[in-house]
Image: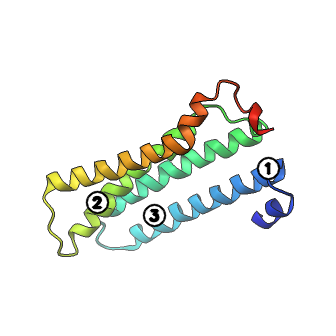
Amino acid sequence: MLAVGLASGAGTTTAQLAGDLAILLAALTALTTHTRAVLKKRVNTLGQWFVVAGLALWSAGQAVWTVNGITLNHEYPFPSLADIGFVWYALPVSVGLVLLLRGQGLRLPLRRTILDAGVVASSTFFIAWSSVLGPLAADKDGQDDYH
């Protein structure tokens, strides 16, 4: 699928569709495999379920993005519901990863755990804002510059 998109040339509708579908497939694969792994274990930890929640947010965001691309001819609205999944997936995943580390003999105070997760989540948000979301919000003409 990705090869078809790459072969069609950068920026084409086919390439955009292939890219969107490839990322959606990756997100759904990650969500499915991690959820199945958690369900197979006899002892499920809270950290694993936080990671599943983050993967679900990412998958939902990518699904909305892909549907918007298909139905709106790759004219993506900003802001959209997809942004919720793209920006906020980092918070539950960060909490989950910190909780998973807690069982590895590394003792972290709860206050530090919360602050670490907040730093990771806010860093992800600020990187997303400065690289993608901010320029899109500042673009008054929509996506006319990209055609």
Q: What is the crowding at mark 2: few (fewer than 14 residues within 10 Å), some, or many (at least 20)?
A: few
Image coloring type: rainbow
Instruction: Give the mark nearest the N terminus, 1 or 3.
Output: 1
Label 2 and label 3: CA atoms lie apart by 13 Å
Q: What is the crowding at mark 3: few (fewer than 14 residues within 10 Å), some, or many (at least 20)?
A: some
> Viewer-nearest of labels 2 and 1?
1
Using residue 83 as the reference point, say whether residue 52 is left or right of it: left
Residue 8 in sight: yes
Label 1 and label 3: CA atoms lie apart by 34 Å
Instruction: Give the mark nearest the N terminus, 2 or 3.
Output: 3
What x and y, as percent, mark residue 134? 53, 35
Figure quadrant of residue 137: top right
Using residue 65 as the reference point, say whether residue 124 is left or right of it: left
Using residue 51 as the reference point, say whether residue 132 is left or right of it: right
- The quarter of the image holding the C terminus is top right
What x and y, as percent, mark residue 122? 36, 45
Q: Secondary structure at mark 2?
A: helix
Give the amino acid type for the residue marked by disc 3 in the picture.
Thr
Q: Which residue is mark 3?
A: 35
CB atoms at circles 1 and 3 under 8 Å apart?
no
Residue with the most extreme right position: 8
What x and y, as percent, mark residue 123? 38, 49
Using residue 93 as the reference point, say whether residue 3 is left or right of it: right
Residue at 71% across / 56% down in the picture? 19
Instruction: Give the mark nearest the N terminus, 2 or 1.
Output: 1
Disc number at residue 11? 1
Residue at 38% across / 56% down in the picture? 93
- The quarter of the image holding the N terminus is bottom right
Give the amino acid type for the residue marked by disc 1 in the picture.
Gly
Q: Which residue is mark 2?
A: 46
Q: What is the crowding at mark 1: few (fewer than 14 residues within 10 Å), some, or many (at least 20)?
A: few
